Amino acid sequence: PLSHSLRLAKKYQAELHMLHALVLWDDDPHNPAYHFPDKEELQKRLKEAAADRMSADLEKADIEDLVVKQVYERGMTPAETITRYAGENDIDLIVIGTHRRRKIRYLIGSVVKEVVRMAPCSVLTISQDDEETPAYALYSSQEIL
C-alpha cells in the first residue's frame, strides 16, 4: 500500500504517517506463559526492525516534496492501535494492505476488518496482489475525492 499512499499524499499535498503498531502480549510480568527475558530489549529490537523496514521502503520511493512521519505506537491489538492513532491525530484516510489468508480470515477475522469497523475516518484497503498494479490503474483521481 506504500505506493498508493505516496500517490495520494502527493496528489493532495498531505502529510503521510507511516505507522508501525508494536503489539506485545507481555503486559503482565507475573504471567509465565507470556514472559520474555528482557521486554525492554525486545521492544527496542522490534522498533529498530520496523524503522529499518520503513526507511528501506522510503529509500526506494519518490518522496520529494512530501512530509513523511514514521510512527511507532504500542497497543493491545494492531487494529486498536491504528484506529486510536488515527483518531488522536486527525487522520483523514487510512491506507492498509490486505493479506490472502482466505480460510483463516473467515474463522478469526482480520486486522483489516477490525480497522474498517472501528476507524474514525475512511479506509482504503489494498490487496497485496494490487501492490504491483500501478495506483492509477486501480482508481481514477475522480473516484477518490
Image (cartoon, grey):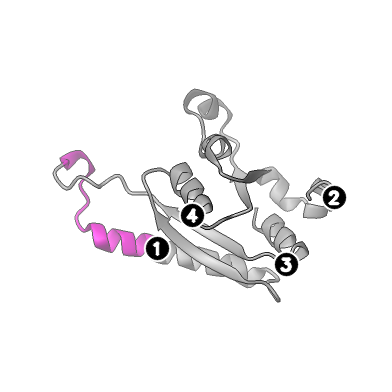
Type of amino acid at the residue the image marks with label 4: Glu
Type of amino acid at the residue the image marks with label 3: Gln
> Which of pointers 4 and 3 lies earlier in the amino acid sequence?
3
Read off the residue under disc 3.
Answer: 13
Main secondary structure type of the part rendered in magenta: helix
Type of amino acid at the residue the image marks with label 2: Ser
The answer to whether residue 134 shows anywhere in this view is no
Read off the residue under disc 1.
Answer: 47
Judge whether 107 appears above or below 133 on screen: above
Q: Percent position (x, y) of residue 38?
A: 21, 58
Read off the residue under disc 2.
Answer: 140
Q: Find the residue positioned furthest to the top.
A: 107
| The quarter of the displayed image where residue 2 is located | bottom right
The answer to whether residue 105 shows anywhere in this view is yes
Q: Is residue 112 magenta?
A: no
Q: Percent position (x, y) of residue 119?
A: 55, 42
Counting every numbered tag in the picture gives 4
> Which of pointers 4 and 2 lies earlier in the amino acid sequence?
4
Q: Percent position (x, y) of residue 115?
A: 54, 40
Q: In what element is the residue under mark 4?
A: helix
Q: Which of 55 and 112 is in front in this view?
A: 112
- Separation of disc 3 and disc 2 at Cα? 17 Å
124 vs 133, left or right, is: left
The magenta stretch is: 31-46
Q: In what element is the residue under mark 1?
A: helix
> Which of pointers 4 and 1 lies earlier in the amino acid sequence?
1
